[in-house]
Image (cartoon, rainbow, N blue to C red):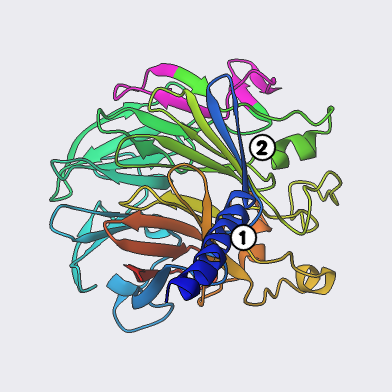
């Protein structure tokens, strides 16, 4: 037995060391000015993800007998402390409230376009505070309208800047929102952004500007690339840390609630960032490479990025028929790529690039559920349960 142990022990040690070396080689970690930078080569979980998504239900229908379930441009989703679900039905100028089982409960907001009490003009974002009050962002007039849980307007205030989707609200009710890439509105018109102009801005709950952050990349005066290359998605976690993912850059970043950079992440892809695009005036950019479509963070601090397993072919781009290539990339709170899992309900994200006003599929994680909003082709919301294996 002792001889057998003497033979087996070195082999076990060797296997452990080999596994550790393989894991260690999967990431290159460095620090720059106190910022952790993680370059991911391959996922920690390999081909066996430790998480799965269980489909629970679809909320809404494209066509049906009950108009309360028929959305027109569903743009955002939230939950209250009782688990009730609120969907911002932007094209119908209303918020639809459902119970946790997806049964319709009530309509909040007037359902009419306007500037009167509880009326929206172009609603784009929705947040709920700890008291159950709803905050609706309207980008056409830069207003945030606050409703109580019954849908009655409490107050409204104007953002002293450009209100862009999707804003997110911190615990102290500061608002994080996009600074439109490429152009900045001034009193005399629009000017090009400069490199020092941040891609995100923070405003207080009176609409006053606090700070801008997230460094933009300059593209040598090529306006279309400058606009496109700096498109980002954002989210915040339960500790009010702020996350951004770049749609056309291999770049994910994490910031503190006051805008200080904490973490930078990238991952190995079999394609590179695009520096040449076919420009059709403010129309589709069909030849750009997509690195991320949307981002959110779960209750355990894991970062979820909706992305693509590969880039569409030339024929797929031209036809706007996208195969089942969408996936979720999952990173831990320190930026290590844990694994990739496929998304079964693909939607045609290319159709969302046909206009700057259209949106890609959008994810939001609330409690232990992941929601995918398809604002255009299907106009429904998918609900999944996040399950640790």
- Image point (42%, 67%), residue name: 50
Is 108 left or right of 42, judged from the image as shown?
Answer: left
> Alpha carbon of mark 2 to alpha carbon of mark 1: how far?
17 Å
Secondary structure of the residue carrying numbered label 1: helix
Q: Is residue 237 visible?
A: yes
Q: Residues within 10 Å of mark 1 (few under 14, many from 20)?
A: many
Magenta stretch contains residue 196: yes
Is 339 left or right of 241, judged from the image as shown?
Answer: right
Which region shows up in magenta? 184-210
- Asked if 381 appears above or below 259 in the picture, the reply is below
Residue 28, numbered circle: none
> Residue under circle 2?
230
Q: Residues within 10 Å of mark 2 (few under 14, many from 20)?
A: many
> Residue under circle 1?
352
**Label located before the other in sequence (2 or 1):** 2
Secondary structure of the residue carrying numbered label 2: loop
- Asked if 73 appears above or below 301 in the picture, the reply is below
Where residue 170 sits in the image (x, y, percent)? 31, 33
Quarter of image, res 253: top right
Is 132 left or right of 26, judged from the image as shown?
Answer: left
């Amino acid at each position: 037995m002792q001889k057998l142990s003497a033979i087996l022990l070195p082999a076990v040690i060797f296997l452990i060391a080999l596994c550790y070396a393989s894991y260690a080689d999967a990431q290159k970690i460095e620090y720059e000015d106190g910022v952790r930078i993680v370059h991911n080569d391959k996922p920690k979980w390999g081909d066996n993800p430790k998480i799965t998504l269980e489909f629970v239900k679809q909320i809404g229908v494209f066509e049906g007998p009950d108009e309360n379930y028929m959305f027109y441009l569903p743009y955002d989703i939230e939950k209250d402390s009782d688990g009730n679900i609120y969907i911002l039905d932007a094209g119908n100028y209303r918020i639809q409230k459902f119970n946790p089982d997806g049964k319709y409960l009530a309509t909040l907001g007037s359902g009419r376009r306007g500037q009167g009490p509880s009326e929206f003009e172009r609603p784009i974002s929705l947040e709920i505070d700890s008291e159950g009050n709803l905050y609706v962002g309207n980008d056409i007039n830069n207003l945030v309208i606050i409703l109580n849980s019954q849908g009655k307007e409490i107050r409204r205030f104007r953002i002293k800047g450009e209100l862009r989707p999707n804003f997110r609200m911190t615990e102290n009710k500061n608002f994080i929102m996009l600074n439109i890439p490429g152009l900045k509105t001034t009193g005399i018109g629009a000017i090009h952004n400069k490199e020092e102009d941040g891609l995100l801005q923070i405003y207080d709950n009176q609409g006053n500007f606090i700070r801008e952050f997230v460094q933009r990349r300059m593209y040598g005066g090529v306006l279309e690339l400058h606009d496109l290359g700096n498109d980002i998605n954002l989210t915040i976690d339960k500790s009010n840390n702020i996350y951004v993912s770049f749609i056309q850059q291999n770049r994910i970043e994490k910031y503190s609630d006051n805008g200080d950079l904490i973490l930078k992440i990238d991952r190995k892809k079999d394609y590179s960032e695009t520096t040449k695009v076919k420009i059709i005036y403010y129309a589709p950019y069909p030849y750009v490479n997509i690195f991320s479509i949307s981002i959110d963070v779960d209750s355990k601090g894991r970062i979820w990025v909706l992305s693509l397993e590969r880039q569409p072919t030339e024929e797929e781009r031209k036809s706007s028929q996208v195969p089942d290539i969408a996936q979720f990339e999952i990173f831990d709170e320190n930026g290590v790529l844990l694994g990739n899992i496929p998304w079964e309900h693909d939607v045609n994200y290319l159709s969302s690039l046909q206009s700057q006003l259209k949106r890609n599929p959008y994810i939001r994680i609330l409690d232990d559920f992941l929601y995918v909003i398809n604002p255009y082709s299907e106009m429904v919301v998918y609900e999944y349960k996040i399950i640790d294996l």
